[in-house]
Amino acid sequence: MAEISANGYQDIRDRIQAGWQYIELRDEAGVPIVRLPESDPRVTWTHEPGAQTLELTVVVKGDDADIAPLLPKTFGSAALYTVPTDGDPMAVESFTQFTMSTEADQLTVIFKVEVPQVV
């Protein structure tokens, strides 16, 4: 049986990060609220280069143009996708529910994905 090298693990990690291009914020029942592309300024990869855990941080505010019309809204999970609409999530993470009631509210979601360790 072959063993994956450190370069192989790094390649897997890089492919995982490159493949997930959208993060969807969902309500407490798992219904989509908004799906944001990785290029959206509210979405940032925040892990250290080469880290075993990939970390994606999303910050949305009540006065964001795509959030304000939906208020009040309760957020409860996030999902990573490779496509802008529909599709199957590659990873889903629940978090403590947060109800955004006013345009002054802000939600920060830190989505962490454990990937194979580079040895």
Image (cartoon, rainbow, N blue to C red):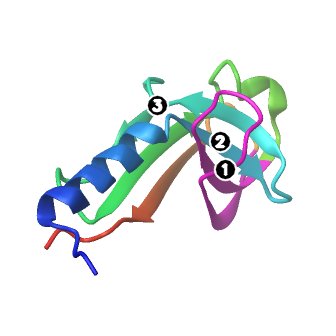
The percent coordinates of residue 116 (x first, y second) are 32, 69
The percent coordinates of residue 30 (x first, y second) are 81, 55
* Residue at mark 2 to residue at mark 3: CA–CA distance: 10 Å
Residue visible at 22% across and 75% down? Answer: 3
Residue visible at 74% across and 48% down? Answer: 26
Please, what is the three-letter code of the amino acid marked with disc 1?
Answer: Pro
Q: Earlier in the sequence, mark 2 or mark 3?
A: 2
* Circle 3: element type: loop
The percent coordinates of residue 89 (x first, y second) are 67, 50
Please, what is the three-letter code of the amino acid marked with disc 3?
Answer: Glu
Quadrant assignment for the C terminus: bottom left
Quadrant assignment for the N terminus: bottom left
Residue visible at 14% across and 57% down? Answer: 7
Badge 3 is on which residue?
38
Q: Earlier in the sequence, mark 3 or mark 1?
A: 3
Q: Tell me if residue 15 is in the magenta stretch.
A: no
Left or right position of 71 against 119: right
Residue at the outermost top position: 65
Seen from the viewer's position, the closer of residues 7 and 54 is 7
Residue at the outermost front position: 1
The quarter holding residue 93 reads bottom right
* Residue at mark 1 to residue at mark 2: CA–CA distance: 9 Å
Seen from the viewer's position, the closer of residues 34 and 17 is 17
Left or right position of 118 against 56: left
Left or right position of 110 against 91: left
Of the residues tagged 1 and 2, which is closer to the observer? 1
Badge 2 is on which residue?
24
Residue 76 visible in the shown view: yes
